[in-house]
């Protein structure tokens, strides 16, 4: 039995992902009061990988490796989370928040270019103009080193979207999520141990603090397992340009969450930038290139009942 996912359904799955990711900044900020970024990332993906293995043990979510070319999905995992999250975390430390937002806003543009070159997907000139306009709404400054690190975030984020889109026909959404989360757990586990010079207590002790543990549960279960499954499923249907345009939706959610939950200031500049992002997302979807005949016929077998 197969379930067909419509383009509208894929759009809402991707929107759900970026809506959830809009709250990860708050959770990460809470967790960083108790542990370093590498420790935070290790626990996030270790718990996510554990949950995925428990789901795998039910027999409803098989993962098959034999006689398959793994390099496309391994490439996706290298881009994100292995490269993307360290660049994001340490880039934020070296630049202003506004400048970081401007740099992250480059991911849709970079993804659009990647998708056109590597996947031969059609992108209209209107989509390109809209993405550039949204990018131009941000203003900020930061150190040159911070700029270079955040540039790595841009390339890694765009590379992940394109790599996942490319291997969506060979691996299920669960398999892609399983492999990439496993890579994140392994990479950040090693990096966190090296960062603390093999002092395992510095890696373990943060989990004894309730705020850190609760933040990790959200980041692992909701922001990693559920969100990556949703995004990977959406990438089987949506072209790269339409998916990447939603990235900045998480920025709007982050701003609103800060205003509503942390009572941060919200001026007319933030309001105008948020509105331009939402208009840009609508524009990219509205002026998308015509879908290929089989674009909405990608299927994935349902788990056996």
Image (spheres, rainbow, N blue to C red):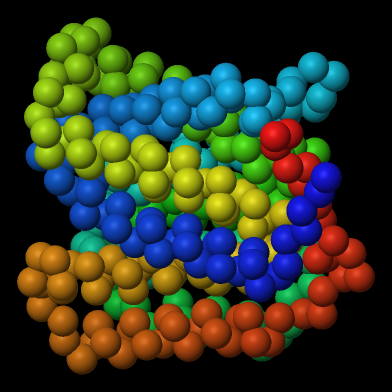
Asked whether residue 113 is in view, the answer is no
Out of 230 and 259, give the one closest to the viewer. 230
Out of 79 and 55, give the one closest to the viewer. 55
> Where in the figure is residue 39, as x and y percent of width and height?
26, 27
Residue that appears at 80% across and 39% down: 170
> Where in the figure is residue 154, as x and y percent of width and height?
49, 55
Residue that appears at 51% across and 84% down: 280
Residue that appears at 45% across and 28% down: 51
Residue that appears at 37% across and 27% down: 47
Quadrant in which the N terminus appears: top right
For residue 148, above or below residue 127: above
Quadrant in which the C terminus appears: top right
Asked whether residue 190 is in view, the answer is yes
- Where on the picture, by quarter, is residue 55? top right
For residue 93, above or below residue 5: above
- Where on the picture, by quarter, is residue 265? bottom left
Left or right: 23 as drawn, with respect to 2:
left
- Where on the picture, by quarter, is residue 67? top right
For residue 57, above or below residue 184: above
Query: Number of numbered discs present?
Result: 0
Q: Residue furthest right?
A: 293
> Where in the figure is residue 259, as x and y percent of width and height?
15, 73
Left or right: 13 as drawn, with respect to 190:
right
Left or right: 37 as drawn, with respect to 237:
left
> Where in the figure is residue 79, as x and y percent of width and height?
55, 41
């Amino acid at each position: 039995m197969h379930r067909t996912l419509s383009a509208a359904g894929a759009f809402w799955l991707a929107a759900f992902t970026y809506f959830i990711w809009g709250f990860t900044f708050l959770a990460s900020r809470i967790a960083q009061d108790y542990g370093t970024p590498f420790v935070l990332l290790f626990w996030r993906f270790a718990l996510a990988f554990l949950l995925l293995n428990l789901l795998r043990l039910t027999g409803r979510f098989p993962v098959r490796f034999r006689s398959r070319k793994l390099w496309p999905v391994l490439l996706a995992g290298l881009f994100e989370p292995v490269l993307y999250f360290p660049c994001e975390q340490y880039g934020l430390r070296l630049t202003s928040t506004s400048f970081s937002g401007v740099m992250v806003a480059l991911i849709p543009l970079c993804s659009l270019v990647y998708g056109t070159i590597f996947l031969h997907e059609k992108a209209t000139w209107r989509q390109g103009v809209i993405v550039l306009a949204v990018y131009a709404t941000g203003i900020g400054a930061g150190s040159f080193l911070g700029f270079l690190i955040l540039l790595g975030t841009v390339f890694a984020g765009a590379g992940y979207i394109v790599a996942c889109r490319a291997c969506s026909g060979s691996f299920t959404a669960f398999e892609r999520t399983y492999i990439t989360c496993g890579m994140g757990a392994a990479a950040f586990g090693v990096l966190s141990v090296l960062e603390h010079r093999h002092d395992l207590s510095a890696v373990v002790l943060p989990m004894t603090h309730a705020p850190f543990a609760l933040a990790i549960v959200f980041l692992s279960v909701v922001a990693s397992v559920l969100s990556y499954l949703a995004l990977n499923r959406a990438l089987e249907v949506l072209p790269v340009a339409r998916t990447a345009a939603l990235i900045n939706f998480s920025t709007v959610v982050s701003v609103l969450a800060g205003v509503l939950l942390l009572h941060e200031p919200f001026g007319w500049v933030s309001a105008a930038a948020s509105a331009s992002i939402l208009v840009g997302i609508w524009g990219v979807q509205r002026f998308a290139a015509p879908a290929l005949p089989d674009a909405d016929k990608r299927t994935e077998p349902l788990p056996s009942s």
